[in-house]
Image: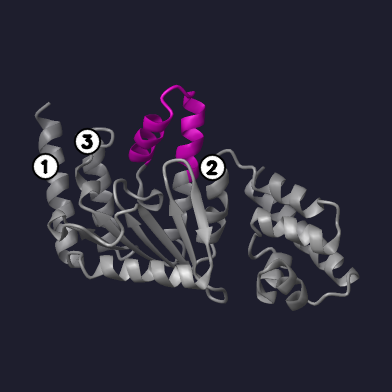
Amino acid sequence: MANGSRQAAWEFFGAELKRRREDAGLSQSALGTRVFVSGGYIGQFEQAIRKPQLDVAERIDEVLQTDGIFERMCRKLIDDRRYADYFAAVVELEALATKICEFAPTLVPGLLQTSAYARAVTLAANPFVADAYVDEIVAARLERAGILKDAARPEYWVVLHENVLYIPVGGPEIMAQQLDHLVTLGRERQAMVAVLPYAAGAHASMGGSLKFLDFEDAPPTLYTETEYSGTLVDEPAVVKHALRTYDLLRVAVLSPEASLSLIESAAEDYRRCASST
């Protein structure tokens, strides 16, 4: 489904939700209370500003007694094979966020990947797929990254463990290009890039990656991911605890300038390696 038709479908979802809610005699706040989200969220669903998660759509059907219509529409709209089911909602939220903070322990985050690096990562996880599938995944990743070039782009803060610089994804030439790209984004102030050095030793997020999304008029959301699944969390206590973890990571990182210098040095090492082979 093209982006334009997908947005039109979400607008229909919102209009239908508003009609069914009003027919049931419920305000946005009243419906929100029954499905465990704020009334503001319901308003954003109705305006197609924010997309509901599947479990919220299921609860809306239960409260409004709509025989599964919102669940079915939601399943259809989030069925985008370019993204894993658990990640599709994250892509929608990234486009709405005013600030994104991320910790990457092993790989360059998707929003910062070059085409060649993204292709190497995709092939490593899917060695038997057709080229067309790889092309689609890479194109989707680059499309996501477009939010960092938009005039209304979110602030993007990323902490990279030093591991990220020295895992040679795709080989020396691809790594050199990828690290150069990180430096460019940092120098052009499209992203705040910091490196957590090996010298920091044990750190606050030994369990894996973290991503926080802040919004203009909605509570912050946490996204955590393992190799085969991901979880979106907006429970305030959990998000607050995870933000403290991120704060502890940030006090252990190199300064932005020292981080970019280290990345530049690693890129130069890869270039020398590439030229000698």
Q: Which residue is the site of mark 2? A: 84
Q: Which residue is the site of mark 1? A: 269
> In terms of secondary structure, where does tag 1 sit?
helix
> In terms of secondary structure, where does tag 3 sit?
helix
Left or right of 258? Residue 185 is right
Q: Looking at the image, which residue is at 48% across and 24% down?
A: 129
Q: How far across and how far down the image is residue 169, in percent? A: 27, 37
At label 1, the amino acid type is: Asp
Q: Quadrant of residue 200?
A: bottom left
Where, quadrant-wise, is the C terminus in this rendering? top left
Left or right of 217? Residue 26 is right
Q: State if disc 1 and disc 3 touch (CB < 8 Å).
A: no
Magenta stretch in the rendered image: 115-140
First-in-chain label (3 vs 2): 2
What colour-coding does the image apply? one colour
Q: State if disc 2 and disc 3 touch (CB < 8 Å).
A: no
Circle count: 3
Q: Looking at the image, which residue is at 76% across and 71% down?
A: 31
First-in-chain label (2 vs 1): 2
Q: Which residue is the site of mark 3? A: 173
First-in-chain label (3 vs 1): 3
Q: How far across and how far down the image is residue 248, in percent? A: 27, 69
Query: Is residue 152 at least partly visible in the picture?
Result: no
| Crowd band around label 1 with a 10 angstrom C-alpha radius: few (<14), some (14–19), many (20+) | some
Q: Looking at the image, which residue is at 86% across and 59% down?
A: 65
Where, quadrant-wise, is the N terminus in this rendering? top right
Identify whether 146 is placed above or below 229: below
Left or right of 75? Residue 124 is left
Q: Real-space Cα distance between discs 2 and 1?
A: 35 Å
